[in-house]
Amino acid sequence: MTTMRKILFRPILAGAALAALLLPAVPASANAGATSATVPLRDAEKSPLVSTGWLEKNLDSPKLRIVEVSVDPGVYERGHIPGAHNAAWHTDLVETVSRDIAGPEKFAALARRLGVDRDTTVVLYGDNNNWFAAWGAWVFAQYGLVDTVKLLDGGRKKWEAEKRPLDTRTPEVAASTFAVAPASTSLRARFTDVLAVARKERDDKILDIRSPDEFAGKIIAPAGVPELAVRAGHIPGSVNVPWAKAVNPDGTLRSVEELKALYAEAGIDGTKPVITSCRIGERSSHSWFVLSRVLGYPARNYDGSWTEYGNAVGVPVVNLAGTVWGGK
Amino acid sequence: MTASAAVPAAAPAGAAFRAGLALSLAALLAGSAWHLSGEAGGSRLALSLVFGALFGFVLQRSRFCFLCVWRDFLDRGDPRGVLGILAALATGIAGYAVVFGAWLPDPSGTRLPPGAHIGPVGPALALAGLAFGAGMAVSGSCLSAHLYRLGEGSATAPFALLGSALGFVLGFLTWNPLYLAGIAEAPVVWLPRYLGYGGSLVAGLAVLGGGALWLLRRWPPPPPPSAAVTDPLHAVFVARWPTWLGGLAVGAIATLSYLRLGPLGVTAEIGGRSRQAASALGLLPERLEGLDGFRGCATALRDGLLTPNGLFVGGLVVASFAAALAAGQFQPARPGRGHVLRGLSGGLLLGWGAMTGLGCSIGTLLSGIMAGALSGWVFGIAMLVGITVTLHCGRSLRLLA
């Protein structure tokens, strides 16, 4: 071997090692590790939750629509559950200008695009422990799609952890004829409802799912969050159970018994109507789903939440930290 | 191959050591990627490291440096480097169009493709491009080239990167007035919305093709100083790649990166960390109006030690170092006063331009043009003007070589 050959042979190895770098770029095998303990309770026809194992077996079911609602844009596009459609929470599910849920026309257009009829089973899932998927379920519920709408227990987190297959293709379905109908008012609490509770004119329970520091009024909102309020604290009559306490480390919801105990500790046992609230009304819909759909408690979500109530004029607030007003 | 781009002959002595070190670095990168991919949620981080390493390897091997190729053209009429940049843009435009078509079948609505670097177009963007180009001329490179030159042992690069961090802080300080004076109302123009994917693709390729035809009038370029080496291994690991080959690879990496992670960019980490440090020192305004709502190299505060862009940049530098070692092109130099001054002052302009333009020659120019963003073209043209004018003035005043 010449000297030049020796010089050149070694970089081959360097090149081979660089090529080895490509290994993580190869997608995981479609069936690797696709074994999970399924919970039959969560796969029954009437259950509000479906397991990852059940969903994978039923991916091709014609009366099933899988819809991803993720917090981060681009997550769906870079790989989603095969056959899943995408709903963008910040454009498809809201009226962008009037701070409201999607109106009747907009929601009907979305349902038609997704091929959803009133008898279609819809499975919603997303990132961040199904936070926005649950919010999607709450929006669907405003238009009468309640029992047919389920969450994938564990969401993207569990599906990915189990190395189940992902797809980047966008499915095409025939549009449905979903009729435009007004939104119901029964699952949505408004400012006047929570004010009535705060003034002890109504005997509902308010479940505030924000962090303990926000609830106590030590901070108005978490660092870096743009939506603020003039005052800190919580609505009188509220109890605090942070939303993520309902979730296991693997992203699944805790068992019914554990959930009942969790909320019973805060005095919520289903005997009184509950109003869920947070900062902008989205994480609280996760707790709304748990209370209303999983536990069967009478619950409404207050999407105005602290950014509406904490900015309102002439309403009582509770501030445990003694920093009601920012002025000195 | 120009004189300045000539490859130093790698002496046989020390070659084994260099190759062994390069191999160790490649193994370190591979091991790190493998380790990251096994962590919960680590596949994105692992992939960022891999793409960064591939990008660094390609940049170093093909001398993919916007300033160098533009200077080759201005000074010696050699069009090959600029043709390589055009090849990267053409490949990326085609690749992005394929991805866009799958993700957002109808571009005519109000939505933009997720994450694509499509920024506001206005005087501030042009000013950012001019400043960035001036910074390139003063410091001798754009930011991505400083990063790969860090791996080659450049004496200027560390100071240019430090200067760019300071430039970012300066950019944060001037952001609010510029935002209120024009950026807030500046249109975010995405060409496929008006031309469709086909029209945008044809228009983009026509402009690049027209530029290539104009450059080809300068053909043949000056003869290379040494005879071409035909050994393929030498061609890959020792000799400089032709820039068009690097360009094709950059376009492919940009497309794959967008498909799996996000658009290419090298300033998000520098900007994010600068913002964090300046915020901790109380140097920043209470709020940076509207900044985090724009597309581009996001400088939002970091919440973890390892971030995708941090690993991308780390992989770029380490792979460039490994590639330079294997090729015998790692030539560390002791920094002189000139290196420090040019690095810091040029870096300051680079940082300010990259912050105000929401990205650099990679994040705004390359990723923007590939995505069909008018902002990419405006930044790119302003950048070339900035380089040309600064080089001309600097040379007239005998301040720049």
Image: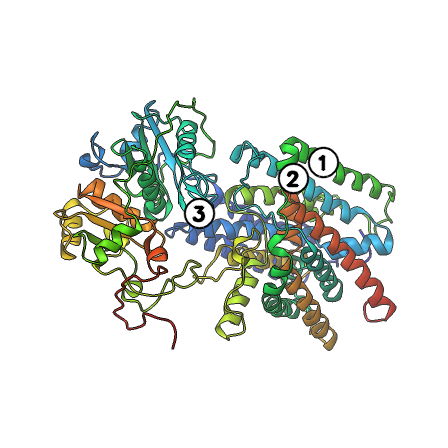
List the residue tagged with mark 1: B203
Specify whether disc 2 shares its chain with disc 3. Answer: no
What separation in Å lies between label 2 and label 3 (alpha carbons)? 24 Å
Q: Which residue is mark 2?
A: B191
Q: Residues under labels 3 and 1: Cα distance?
A: 31 Å
Left or right: B381, with A20 as reference point: right
The subunit letter for the residue under badge 3 reads: A
Rendering quarter of residue A57: top left
* Residue A327 higher or lower than B203, as above or below: below
Q: Amino acid at mark 2?
A: Leu
Q: Secondary structure at mark 2?
A: helix
The amino acid at mark 1 is: Ala
Query: Percent position (x, y) of residue B255?
Result: 59, 41
Q: Chain of mark 2?
A: B
* Camera-side mark, 2 or 1: 2
Q: Residue at horizontal 84%, vertical 41%?
A: B214
Q: Which mark is residue B83?
A: none
Give the image location of residue A174, x and y in percent: 43, 22
What residue does disc 3 label? A72
Callout 3: 10 Å neighbours few (<14), some, many (20+)?
Answer: some
Q: Nearer the viewer, mark 2 or mark 3?
A: 2
